[in-house]
Amino acid sequence: MSKIQVLVVDDSALVRKLLSEILNSDPDIEVVGTAIDPYQAREKIKKLKPDVLTLDVEMPRMDGVTFLKNLMRLHPMAVVMVSTLTEQGAGVTLEALELGAVDFVAKPKIDLSATMGDYAEEIIEKVKTAAAVNVHALVREKPAATEVSEKLTADAVLAKQTPGAIPSHLKTTDKIIAIGSSTGGTEAIKDILRTLPAHSPGIVITQHIPAAFSGPFAERINGLSALEVCEAQDGQQILPGHAYIAPGDKHLMVERSGARFHCKLNDGPAVSRHKPSVDVLFRSVAQSLGSNAIGLMLTGMGDDGAKGMLEMKEAGSFNFVQDEKSSVVWGMPGQAVKIGAAELQVPLNKIADKLMSLI
């Protein structure tokens, strides 16, 4: 099998050297060139025809987002953004994901050698994922966590229980929609939430995203949607017409209190190597809501959430997934289908309609 060919674009010679050394250390990856700015990158893309581009957000002469916009219009390809994990960097990076970037990693912290091994694992994994994604799905669908630790299950945060019978005086007909996603999910979530009407049921969402990004991500969607979208807070009541996005460093769970439901945040260990974890959210939904829940798995790599979705199905919920053709990566939804946790596969542009038909 031929190696994944990568072009590294960054105005810092030290970062170019570091990223090249990290990526070349993997036997399946070859850095075929580097560029100091988008103008040089443009020429090297023509000459070297790389499979994946790592692209710095902040560069002289032309910033990374402007270059990405032109690139996706003229020559769509797999791009991993290299960004500072600050609130300002979050806004720019989310814009890059809107334009068609596959994923993002933080700027390497050269002075923190103790964490460099984890960083290397992360960027190698994301470059490999980027090389395999359906880039044309990324571009076509646009409208006019590091996996190095022991892989724990949801048991590490929430013990599995058989849902008990709900007393008749506490029963409710209220529905809650639970959504899980990873790579490509920020744009899929945005497309769905800005299409749903204000009278939609409460929605709880776990998206694999860094802590610095989850707040700005929620704010960005809130400005586009008829729903009230926010970063979930511990103890917050889940209300119709609202969507609650898990903070990037906490597990989000649904907890029943009488006939009402609340967000519960948990600072426990990573589950399925992710924090927040979709498995944790889905298990809590299975135990708290049973047949009153609707489960939806969107694009994402890995298998986080599949087992939790199966528990939701066993508790009586109706589950479905984004179909393979419209997914950037069909890992998480594909695994849910594989183990029988989902009833249907639905294209991204039909998901909002499907949700409304179910409620």
Image: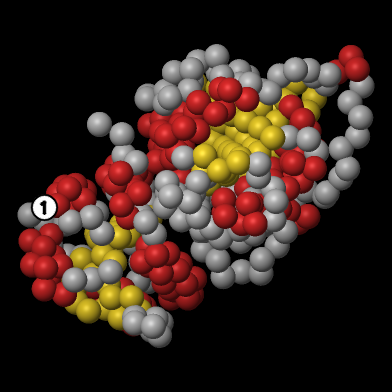
In the depicted structure, whether residue 244 falls above or below residue 322: above
Mark 1: secondary structure: loop
Relative to 205, say whether 335 is above or below.
below
User: In this image, 172 relative to 321: left or right?
Assistant: right
| Residue positioned 11% across, 68% down in the render | 46
Image position, residue 118 (x, y; %): 49, 71
Residue 27 occupies quadrant: bottom left
Expressed as whole percent of the image width and height from the top left, the position of residue 251 reads: 64, 45
Location of residue 291 by image quarter: top right
**What's the amino acid at mark 1?**
Met
Q: Is residue 269 left or right of residue 72?
A: right
**In the image, is residue 303 above or below residue 194?**
below
State the image quarter where residue 147 is shown.
bottom right
Quadrant of image for the N terminus: bottom left
Q: Which residue is mark 1?
A: 62
Q: Does the image show residue 66?
A: yes
Q: Which colour assignment does the render follow?
A: secondary structure
The residue shown at (12%, 60%) is 38
The answer to which of 230 and 301 lies nearer the viewer is 301
